[in-house]
Image: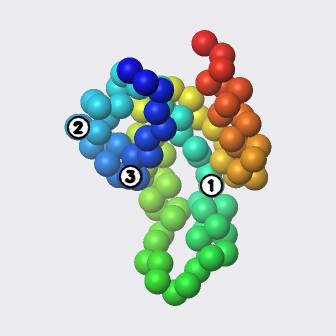
Amino acid sequence: PEPAVIVAAASSALGPAGAAALHTCEVVYLRASPAVLAARLTAGDDGHRPQLDLVALFAERDPGYQRLASRVVDADRPAEEVAQTISEALARP
């Protein structure tokens, strides 16, 4: 198959069908802390975003994402650094 970038919706990857579909793929988990996610969400907040308990969501979902991921990348860093890390990691077997 052709290489592709697919972004799975947050909770869909944790369900049985999503996990099964991703099982044979290279899965990169962009792991960002709840504090960084909150800062990013509020930076461009137009008042239409739902209020989320990011700490609870992170605690609930992180273990599943860790299990599913082939690679985990620290996404608390600037986007350019994260992209470079991913590019370098995927270039290695």
From the image, state whether disc 3 or disc 1 is nearer to you.
3
Residue with the mark numbered 2: 17
Label 2: which secondary element? helix
Residue type marked 2: Ala
Residue with the mark numbered 3: 9
Q: Considering only vertical position in the picture, is 57 above or below 14?
A: below
Residue displayed at 71% across by 26% down: 88
Q: Nearer the viewer, residue 38 or 90?
A: 90
The earlier-in-sequence mark between 2 and 1 is: 2
Q: Does residue 3 appear in the picture of this structure?
A: yes
Q: Considering only vertical position in the picture, is 12 above or below 47?
A: above
Residue displayed at 33% across by 43% down: 14
Quarter holding the C terminus is: top right
Give x and y (percent) for residue 22: 35, 31
Q: Is residue 84 left or right of residue 29?
A: right
Residue type marked 1: Ser
Q: Considering only vertical position in the picture, is 9 above or below 21?
A: below
- Image quadrant in which you'd find residue 35: bottom right
Residue displayed at 60% across by 62% down: 37
Q: Among all residues in the image, which is located at the extreme front?
A: 2
Q: Is residue 12 left or right of residue 5?
A: left
CA gap, disc 3 and disc 1: 18 Å
Residue with the mark numbered 1: 33
